[in-house]
Image (cartoon, rainbow, N blue to C red):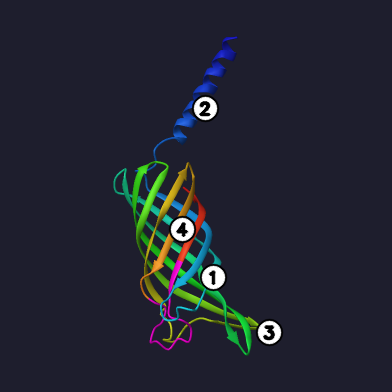
Amino acid sequence: MKRITLAAALLALTFSTSVNAQDVDQRDRLRLGLKGGLNFSSLIQDDYPNYEVNHKLGYVGGAYLSIPLTTFLGIQPEVLVSQKGFSSSNSNFFGGTYTFNRTTTYLDIPLMVQLKPSQFITIVGGIQYSYLLSKKDEITGNSVIISDQVTYDNQDITKNILGVVGGIDINIKHFMVFGRYNLDLRRNNGDGTSSVPRYKNQVFQVGVGLVF
């Protein structure tokens, strides 16, 4: 009977220690994370007000580092591969309508300030550097598909773009759920010879992460 009581006490102590360890506040610790999710991207442009665009679904994924300054304040740099773009189907093409899809892949490097009001919620905001890796245009119309994929080496589009980013992280032990909004501060055209509307990317992001 004493052995059973002792075993039960040890089990209860182990369980209590495990729960308490999982509930330890992690805000003042350096942590590495991996994240991935979905982009809902579109654009902002003023040159062609009648050029209507639709949101495009893409992916985002990469790694981040949570660097504490205090319990309530920190810095969060990230390195992400992010697929953006837009689609449009409101123009004429050889006497009919067509759908234009642009898919761009960027290397995004956000540098954000963390506000941590609780161990479960982190509010982030800052600047983002984006480097264009590749672009794919696809035109579909009149049973014809025209596809063009290039890696830019000319000056008709800007490859280096600075933007702003903000959002929130919900932290649950070693898991994280995030939401973001980011917007380019500079238009996509370089020397102004681009044949597509000059625009700024805007992206809504949702996803999950694993924190170590």
Residue 2 percent location from the top left of the image = 57, 10
| Residue underneath mark 1 | 54
Helix, strand or loop: magenta stretch:
loop
- Residue that numbered label 3 is attached to: 142
Residue annotated with mark 4: 63
Amino acid bearing label 3: Asn
Spatial separation of the CA atoms under disc 3 and disc 2: 66 Å
From the viewer's perspective, is residue 120 above or below residue 128? above
Q: CA distance from mark 1 to mark 4?
A: 29 Å
Place residue 5 in its image quadrant.
Answer: top right
**Residue flagged by tag 2: what amino acid is it?**
Phe
- Depth check: give the residue in front, 118 or 95: 95
Q: Is residue 93 above or below residue 27?
A: below
Q: Secondary structure at mark 1?
A: loop
Q: Residue at x 36, y 75 (%)?
A: 186
Q: Dot 3 lies on which element?
A: loop
- The answer to whether the residue labelled 1 contacts the one labelled 4, judged by CB atoms less than 8 Å apart, is no
Q: Closer to the camera: disc 1 or disc 4?
A: 1
Q: How many marks?
A: 4
Q: Is residue 4 above or below residue 211?
A: above
Q: What whole-number distance in Å separates the C-alpha atoms at marks 4 and 3?
A: 43 Å
Residue 49 in the figure: left or right of residue 164: right
N-terminal of the pair, mark 4 or mark 3, is 4
Specify which label sits upstream in the sequence, 1 or 3. Answer: 1
Sequence-wise first label, 2 or 1:
2
